[in-house]
Amino acid sequence: MKGQFPIEKFGALQTPFYYYDTQLLRQTLSIIRAEIGKIDNAVEHYAVKANANQQVLRIIREYGLGADCVSGGEIKAALQAGFSPDKIVFAGVGKADWEINLGLEHDIFCFNVESIPELEIINELAAAKGVVAKVEFRVNPDVKAHTHTNITTGLAENKFGISLNDVERVIAMAQQMQHVKFIGLHFHIGSQILDMGDFAALCNRVNELLTQFEKHHIQVENINVGGGLGIDYQHPNRQSIPDFCEYFKTFNSLIKRRDGQMLHFELGRAVVAQCGTLISKVLYVKQGTNKQFAILDAGMTDLIRPALYQAYHKIENISSELPVETYDVVGPICESSDVFGKAVDLNKVQRGDLLAIRSAGAYGEIMASQYNCRELPRSYTTEDLL
């Protein structure tokens, strides 16, 4: 075993594959549960979009977390993993009728509604079933998050949520409808956020809204602040578990909750990213004019983040202790963007070596595709390889 990887077991497995360190996942979940336990009336709904692997989901459910879903398929995955419907929230800017009906049939905790047309359809579909749908309104708080442009969601220019100026009017509309019940507000400003000042700004906006609503006698039972806490992609060993203490403390200390108000979180990446690694085999080492390439059997079809976001993932040669050389680490896909990293320092790479692409537990396996008619990557957990 080299480091945390059982490479003697890896040799018998077809690459590429995802390896999930479930011991680290359980440690992470234990800390989340302990920190949530310090806050009165608080709930964490794991964001299923980060990773819907059934073994991973079942472990998360064992620790008492709910599920934050953004599609009917994710609701099905959560139910299959044993999540209780009364802990499932359904978000997303474009909910299809069948997805809404699925949520209604299972009496999920609530729908996070993003527009007036969506509210009207939920009311219509609930009326057809003779039920009342619980709804929270996703508010676009117009708060800037210091993260990649493609994963900011809380600015007025983004497609998500109801504008600040319209929220009160939409709540009034809901209160006139017979088949929806307004139960709270939902916010989410982005992903991979490491500056707690961004979350503090969101807290200030939440407080402003609560004060405004109180003046108009609008009761808010639930406040859902989304997720967004980032991880350390540069140092996955040194920072294997994010600073959940500071994250939860920021919201608990700054949001001025009224008596009985529930506080909901929707962390995803921070829960699972560091426990997942993409393991790939070196097919060829190619000497270019000015550089050398390590060509892997994994590509952007297996982990798209570097091609999509120019995202950084630490790469390690777990087969070699030879002196370090510099490589461009690339995949086999017929696209110039199929690159995991440029000028990467690795222990000397040879054909057949196993490379570990770290911090890939979030938005890795779940975003894999079959472009170039490739097979989807398999996955294994610590328990599988005992």
Image (cartoon, helix red, strand yellow):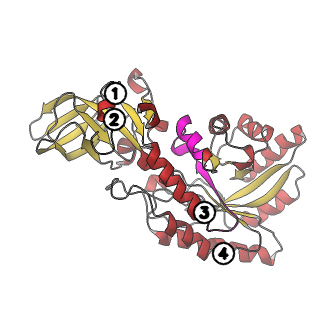
Q: Residues within 10 Å of mark 4 (few under 14, many from 20)?
A: some
Q: Please state which amino acid type lies under the numbered disc 1.
A: Thr
Q: Residue furthest top?
A: 373
Query: Sequence-wise, which precedes: disc 1 or disc 4?
Result: 1
Q: Which residue is mark 2?
A: 279
What separation in Å lies between label 4 and label 3 (alpha carbons)? 21 Å
Q: Mark 1 near mark 2, Cβ–Cβ under 8 Å? A: yes
Mark yes or no: residue 335 visible. no
Please tell me in which quadrant of the rendered image residue 250 appears.
bottom right
Point out the image quarter for the N terminus: top left
Q: Is residue 72 above or below residue 111?
A: above
Kindly report which numbered mark, 2 or 4, lies closer to the viewer in this rendering. Answer: 2
Q: Is residue 376 magenta?
A: no
Query: Sequence-wise, which precedes: disc 2 or disc 4?
Result: 4
Q: Is residue 97 above or below residue 42?
A: above
Kindly report which numbered mark, 4 or 3, lies closer to the viewer in this rendering. Answer: 3
Q: Please state which amino acid type lies under the numbered disc 3.
A: Ile
Q: Residues within 10 Å of mark 2 (few under 14, many from 20)?
A: many
Q: Looking at the picture, how far across and down is residue 19, in whole percent?
A: 40, 37
Q: Please state which amino acid type lies under the numbered disc 4.
A: Asn
Decide if residue 304 is on the left or right side of residue 179: left
Q: Which residue is mark 4?
A: 207
Point out the image quarter for the C terminus: top left
Q: Residues within 10 Å of mark 1 (few under 14, many from 20)?
A: many
Front-lying residue, 166 or 108: 108
Q: Is residue 263 above or below residue 366?
A: below
Q: Which residue is mark 3?
A: 36
Q: Looking at the picture, how far across and down is residue 2, in whole percent?
A: 27, 41
User: Secondary structure under badge 3?
Assistant: helix
Q: Which residue is mark 1?
A: 15
- What residue range appears in magenta? 36-61
